[in-house]
Each structure stands twice: as structure tokens, then as C-alpha cells.
Image (tube, rainbow, N blue to C red):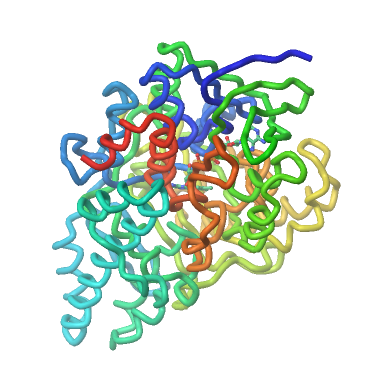
Amino acid sequence: MDTQRFDVIIIGSGISGLAAAAALAKCKRRVVVLEQHFQLGGLTQTFQRSNYIFAAGVHYLGGVAQPQRRAELAGRLLHWLSNGKLQFKAMPSSYDVLQFPDWRFEVESSASHFAESLGRLSLYDRAALERYLSARHSARQDLFALLLDKAMPGTLLPRLARLRYGRYAPDVLQTSTAQMLKPFKDPRVAAVLGARWGCHGMVPSRAPFAVHALTTGSYDNGAYYPVGGPAKFAKTLLATISAAGGKLRPRTKVVEICSAHQRVSGVRLENGEVIEAPVVISTMGARQTAQSLSSGEALAWRESLATLQPGVSCVSLYLGFYGDIREYGATASNVWIYEDEEIGRIWEKPTQEDAPTLFVSFSSLKDPEHPDPLHHTAEIIVPCAFAPFQHWLQSSVGQRPVGYKVDKIHITQRLLAQFKRHFPKLAPLIDFYEISTPLSQASISGSDQGAMYGLEMSAERILHPGLRLQTPVAGLFLAGQDTTSPGIAGALMSGVLAAAHVQPHLWWRVLR
Ligand SMILES: Cc1cc2nc3c(=O)[nH]c(=O)nc-3n(C[C@H](O)[C@H](O)[C@H](O)COP(=O)(O)OP(=O)(O)OC[C@H]3O[C@@H](n4cnc5c(N)ncnc54)[C@H](O)[C@@H]3O)c2cc1C
């Protein structure tokens, strides 16, 4: 049997895996990145159909504008990992447009403008709004400190982190977003503040307020898009890894994390090949990682993680337009469409009812390097239940049964009709469309139920004692969105933090 040795094996080439690999490669560690999919990049990957290029899982992010600013941790880390090659373009100042049945609201990137325009919506709610925004600021900081605390080993570093980022209040997760919205007299203010739950995947009645605060507050200094498109994340970080001698292996599925006596020794691949290393960083998902351990290892840990639930699934419709869509109403702002005033609904029956909420991103308009003024794209994302897709789960890509294909056609037609209703002038320009379901999502990222953001961001998950970067198996570390928070910034940070467990001077990169 073929056997190879590395200092560190990284499972998964999403932003967390690439960040861990690039950080360690920069520290002269011999790393190998193993990726099950044929394309590297995980959810940062793009894919091409005819003349159209689509983004799988990045539409905007915050905290990256000024890498020299101490507070912009994600930007600072990306700048370092990409050797300054990754650049970002600011989205329009109204970066999110919320479209309700009879009115709309533009969310502005300046926090003070946002507060002012909300205040104009309802004079009676100004005091409540002030209290809400202040609570959002504290909750965001609290949750960040808690997540950082859980990512660190021992006791000294968490103490340092608390000095740098503050101490979290234990009750920060006990209040839901919906509870925080109750004091508002004007339902429009509550609707605006609760609307963008799609950024973390939990509806307001269930989401811990701190989770909503962390994700929506991440855009308080503006929203950005990678110049050259999301594929630039992988392109620039892969260059760092390769230049330092790191190895990259797409189409390489890990089926077992080899360990004995609670110490990791390497991984076994689908083809039987074994790769040895004293350290393994797994970004394939916390539950998947525990389930992949050699039998008999860390059973209690495995069982405790099995109780955690996957988060919301999604359906995405990819549209290609021939023509200049800017002339027909499309802009670089995201459009969140709510079909009725009830903003917190997941699409439960996609073959039988219209989607309650649509997130529309005209990605080609966000990228200043988009090469072709006549070929444009939109991604339309709808958070949905997994149950309607459950019975097709056992089938494999390319061999799905006819029933699944028929369902897909119905869902596509329904979503297309909804899109055309909202953007009638763009309808004649549609030249291409394709849909992806939670099953497609599962095959790209390996996530349970094709969950958009991995494990559900419940209080139980966040406080789960087994969900730390350091696992009970010596040398095995977790990283990825399951360990920190949904989104590029959280996953990126988890990768660097996991690398810091291996190369301790990297803590300085985060804590300085
Ligand atoms: C539709 C959608 C839209 C989104 N929009 C945004 C957005 O606008 N802004 C934002 O910040 N975030 C967004 N996100 C979330 C963001 O994309 C993720 O939080 C982030 O990319 C997760 O990174 P990761 O490294 O944890 O996981 P992933 O990118 O999923 O990487 C994990 C990798 O592990 C690989 N893998 C799994 N199992 C194995 C195995 N056994 N062997 C080898 N490899 C394996 C997978 O193939 C995958 O490549 C979106 C997500 C979705 C789904």
C-alpha cells in the first residue's frame, strides 16, 4: 500500500482549509490539502456554463476593506495569506435592498445612515431602535469573544483574547431575534431588522439574537466583493501554498481518519491509499469528522456531536442574461424579496407553493473585472426544508431518478415565474438557467442535508463542549464553519486558529 508523510494533512479546500494550509505553508510546514471534489475551493468555487460564470457560496462579505485596520481581522488575515493579491470592491452604499409586498427599504453601509433611515420610518420607535442597535453591538462582541474563547487551548490564551476582544456574557445566547424585535411599535422597523436571517439561516423566532447580531453587524463598515470573483480566494491562497511546496489533491476523498489510543496518525483515502501525518486538520464538518474516526476512538465525543442538527438547506437558481442588464433595472445591490409581511418563513413545499423569500444577487455587476459586458449572471437563493428532497438522498449525482428530475423542473418553473414577476424587464434577456437543490449542495460541500452553513447556529451548538478546534484525539483539529460561525470570515478565522494550534506564534496574527 502506498504511504506518504507530511507535517499536516488538511481535509477540505474551502476557505477554512485553504487558510489553514496557507498559514502553515508560510511557516514552512509540509502540508497537503485533500479535496473530494474535482475543483478546489469548496464554497468559494465558481462554475461555468456556456458564457456564464456563477458563484456557489459567496455574494458579499464585510470586514475586508482596510487590512491595515486592527478591527478588520478577516481583511488583515486574507491580505497576509494571499500576499496582498486578494483585493475587494465595495458594493453600492445601499448594498442590500429589502423588497416587501408594498414597500422597500435600502440598507446602507454607513451604520449611522442605516440608523437614520430606520428612525425616519417610525418616529415612535427611535428610543427602542437606539437600545436595539446598542444591544446588537454588545451581543456581536460577546459572541465573537465566546467563539474565540472556544477556539483556544489552555487558559492563558483565552485570557489574552478576553483582554483584546472582551469577555462574553453567558446569557448572550438565551434571547431570540424575535424577542428583541417585540418592543417596536411599527412592524416595518421590526421587519427590516429581522429580515436578513438568510445570512445565518435561522428564522427570527429561533435564532439566538447574538447570531443575528454577529452576521448582520459584520456589514456595518460596508459590504465587499472579491475583485475577479469568488474563485480568487482559492486562486490566491493556492498560489501561497504551492509556492511554499504544499501539495494540493482534488478528487481525493478521505474515508477514514486513522487514529489509535486517542492519537491521530493520518488518513485513509477512498482508493485505499494511506497518508501519514502527526497532525490532521479537518474542515469536512464536525459530525462528519467524528464519524470518520477509526472505529472505537472517541466514542463519547462522536455520540455527543451526533445530537447537533444540520442548519437550513437551500435551492439556488442560476440565471444567465444576454444583454446589458443594467439598462433593465439590475444593480450590484443584493435584493431580498419577501412575498408577504411574514419575513421568517422557510420554503417547506417547493413543488407546491411559491418561495416565501428570495435572495437575488447579480454577481457579474459586482466584479469590476467581469470580462464581458453582454453576458451577465444572477444567483437566486431560497432557504428551504430538506424533507422534500429526503427520498432522493440515496441516489447519486448523474443517476437521480425521474421523479427527482420532474420535481426539479417544477421548482425551476416556479422560481423562474417568481423572478420574472419581480424583474419583468429582465425576463426577455434570460438566456440560460439551471437549478441546484440541497442534494447538489451536499455533493459540492459534503454537508449533511446540503445545509448552507453546516450545523445549525443554535445555542446548544455554540455552547457544545465538544465543538472546539481541539478534539479529544491528540493531533486532530477541527476547522470550518461548524466551529466558528457561518460565512467566509468565520470559516477563514477557524482555519488560521487551527493552524495556530500547530504553530503557536500564529496566535499573534489574530490577537495583536
Ligand atoms: C448558497 C450559499 C451562499 C452563501 N453566501 C455567502 C455570502 O454571501 N457571504 C459569506 O460570507 N458566506 C456565504 N455563504 C457561506 C460560506 O460560503 C461558508 O460559510 C464558507 O464558505 C464555509 O467554508 P468552509 O471551509 O467551512 O467549508 P466548505 O467551503 O464547504 O469546504 C469544505 C470542503 O471539504 C470538502 N470535503 C468534505 N468532506 C470531505 C472528505 N471526506 N474528503 C475530502 N474533502 C472533503 C468539501 O468538498 C469542501 O470542499 C454562503 C453559503 C451558501 C451555501
Asked which quadrant contains residue 64, the reply is top left
Q: Is residue 61 above or below residue 68?
A: below
Q: Is residue 491 left or right of residue 119?
A: right
Q: Is residue 465 left or right of residue 229?
A: right
Residue lying at 53% horizontally and 26% vertically, measured from the top left? 51
Q: Position of residue 368 (x, y in %)?
A: 30, 30
Residue lying at 67% horizontally and 56% vertically, measured from the top left? 300
Q: Is residue 432 above or below residue 158?
A: above
Asked which quadrant contains residue 39, the reply is top right
Quadrant showing the C terminus: top left
Asked which quadrant contains residue 282, the reply is top right
Q: Is residue 297 above or below residue 206?
A: above
Residue lying at 46% horizontally and 60% vertically, measured from the top left? 198
Residue lying at 58% horizontally and 32% vertically, measured from the top left? 11
Q: Residue furthest front?
A: 261
Choose between 230 and 7: the one closer to the eye. Answer: 7
Q: Position of residue 192 (x, y in %)?
A: 33, 71
Quadrant showing the N terminus: top right
Choose between 294 and 246: the one closer to the eye. Answer: 294
